Image: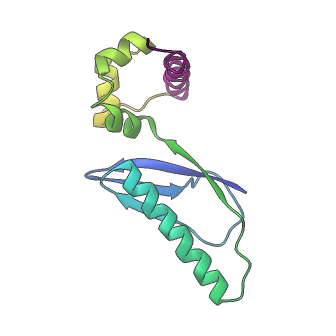
Amino acid sequence: MEIQVLIQKDDNRYEAVIDPDINYDIDFSLFGEGSTVQETIEDFLVSNEEMKELYNEEGKTYPNLTFKYVYDLPSFLQYYSKIISYAGLERLTGVNKTQLNQYVQGYRKPSKKTSQKIEKKLHLFAKELKEVHFI
């Protein structure tokens, strides 16, 4: 079963939680935290292993889980802001850099349409980068 894991920024750390908006019909929760996304995912996977062990000790069958990590847009923007500037994202997506900053600061919440627009443009850019070859 594929579980969607939400990566989000909370003050000075990142958190990973099973997406609370989806009912997976499981009787447990998993949680990870860290100062980077990678640390957070690793901690989340430790939580999963601990839950497997607990199920095993109790003689229960643990579901076969795979994880799909998703970001809320402000957390993604903040995490990647050292690699992709707001000005660069504005040129790439057409979304004003001030607006992008307001999402990160929590002054505004992006609409679903805006989030999808940014995601689509980033995927197209990633596809373009994948085709780059140097001689």
Residue 65 vs residue 31: left or right?
right
Q: Residue at x 38, y 60 (%)?
A: 33
In magenta, the rendered stretch is: 112-135
Q: Identify whether 101 is placed above or below 89.
A: below
According to the image, what is the colour scheme of the structure? rainbow
Q: Is residue 28 magenta?
A: no
- Based on the picture, tell me whether residue 119 belongs to the magenta stretch: yes
Pick the quarter of the image with the N terminus. bottom right
Task: Specify the quadrant of the image occupied by residue 89.
Answer: top left
28 displayed left or right of 105: right
Q: Nearer the viewer, residue 78 or 100?
A: 78
Task: Answer left or right for 75 relative to 47.
Answer: left
Q: In the picture, which quadrant includes the C terminus?
A: top left
Secondary structure mostly seen in the magenta stretch? helix
- Give 87 or 102, whichever is nearer the viewer: 87
Instruction: Say left or right for 44 vs 87.
Output: right
Compared to residue 121, the image places residue 69 above or below, namely: below
Give coordinates of residue 74: x percent, y percent.
38, 36
Rendering quarter of residue 24: bottom right
Q: Position of residue 31 (x, y in %)?
A: 47, 64
Give coordinates of residue 107: x percent, y percent.
30, 33
Q: Position of residue 47 (x, y in %)?
A: 50, 69
